Amino acid sequence: MEKTRETVNPNFEKLGEECGVFGIYDFDGNDVANSIYYGLLALQHRGQESCGIAVTDTSAPRKTDLIKNNGLVNEVFNHDNLASLHGNLGVGHVRYATAGDSSPNNAQPLVINYIKGTIMVAHNGNLINSQALRDELARDGAIFQTTVDTEPIAYIIARERISSKTAENAVSAAMKKIKGAYSLIVASPRKLIGARDPYGFRPLCIGKRDNSYVLSSESCALNTIDAEFVRDVEPGEVVWIDKDGLHSDKSNCIPKAEQGSCVFEYIYFARPDSNIDGMSVYDSRILAGKYLAEDSPVDADVVVGVPDSGNAAAIGYSLGSGIPNATGFVKNSYVGRTFIKPGQKNREDAVHVKLNALREAVDGKRVVMVDDSIVRGTTCDGIIQMLRDAGATEVHVRISSPPFVSECFFGTDVPDKELLIAYKRSVDEICKIIGADSLGYLQIDRVKELSGGQAVCQGCFTGEYPMDVREAEKGRSSCESKDQ
């Protein structure tokens, strides 16, 4: 059986996030594949393993065109194959694998043909009851073609559609059976449907361009296709777009105080030019840096950010401390994906290939290095050594999140807690391991402010989650025992 979790991304031992989703319905009947392509390019940071686009024509919705494969968006798609995708209603997806293996079969969207027709499904997130759902569906005769959570979601929607009046009713009914983190985009023959889990772990927003409606993981993708931001899909809400416009069902919503969106959307995952649930991601990172300067001050000459998500927090630290900000690292943007070879030596090589310290900025100076997180700590020491090799006399590390002490069950690629450098270690012990002159983390009581005061999930920092995760823990233990 496939393990439900994989090791953390060796790209500077950064976090990985499940996926990005994008959908569009053009009421004028124009082909939407090109718009989805550009939307996915804007969401490429959310997943670099595989991608796909599925489209249908609402005037003759018996045919679905689908192209998906492993690779980056501009590797999988070209002018010729995009021109072969005809339809005014479509769904796109970029994937980073945290559940399921790297087979092209696991690329999305999934297209399911069933008694009521065809549905196209794209999913961002991670279910905690995925294995239980698979077991139940298998007992009813389901045959699975993938190992991703999206397939049982699609099967349940299809099954609910048989007894539901509408496709959106089927999605709403399915939400009562699936547990965990999900933002869904579902296309039935004549409707584009979006849904967000009741806790709001993953983002989803609505846009409009001329006579088209758009659904996207992040608002930055709307800007790419000149669409206007309308609003965020609320946690627990189902929205659908048909020939009569935009509609909403909030029957699955829960009180705001019980919600728990992933704070790492603000700290790391989302692009800084996105807005999530009314909060600018850029402003959130600036704020984190200011808090770090206030709570963990240090005498230094220059502040540098580790690209890319550390850059805005470094600006915030500079603003809060009065210490000048400088470009301390040069990033090679053309290296591409970093899953080249396993092993620690190769991870170190990847760091040096992708990142270089800028001697002119740090030579002879006391440096504050700002980054978004330390997960395993396997490459942080190498980045610090880069600064020392470039002439930095001191390196003081500031992290714009609290220490990771527990795993994530909702789609963030945080490894088992035994692999986390902060698990059962003090800040001083971590500081010594990574070779910094001092180390400061964002204080836990600051976390909620990064989302504008909205409830956020802090499980990876505290071990306490917005929902009961015992089923996920049991399922993972079962998978691991079968793998041994």
Image: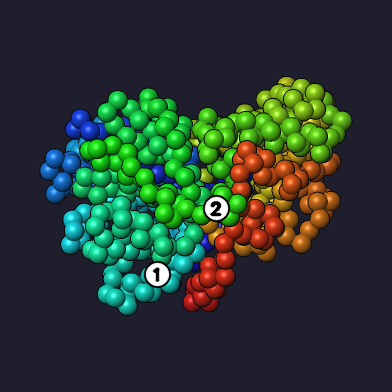
Are there few (<14), some (14-19), or many (20+) residues within 10 Å of tag 2?
Answer: few
Whether residue 347 appears in this view of the structure is no
Near-viewer residue (16 or 92):
92
Near-viewer residue (279 or 103):
279
First in sequence: mark 2 vs mark 1: 1
Residue 448 x, y percent position in the rendering: 66, 44
Tag shown at residue 320: none
At label 1, the amino acid type is Leu
Residue 236 x, y percent position in the rendering: 45, 52
SS state under label 1: helix
Q: Which residue is depicted at the point 46% across and 39% down?
A: 232
170 lies above or below 384:
below
Q: Which residue is depicted at the point 36% across and 63% down?
A: 152
Gap between marks 2 and 1 measured at Cα: 26 Å
At label 2, the amino acid type is Pro
**Residue that numbered label 1 is attached to:** 133
Do the CB atoms of the residues marked 2 and 1 lie less than 8 Å apart? no
On the picture, is 171 further left or further right than 27?
right
**Residue that numbered label 2 is attached to:** 255
- Furthest-right residue in this view: 299
Residue 449 x, y percent position in the rendering: 67, 40
On the picture, is 223 further left or further right than 313?
left
Residue 155 x, y percent position in the rendering: 30, 63
Q: Quadrant of residue 406?
A: bottom right
On the picture, is 431 further left or further right than 190?
right
Q: Quadrant of residue 290?
A: top right
On the picture, is 283 further left or further right than 233?
right
Q: Which residue is depicted at the point 80% across and 48% down?
A: 431
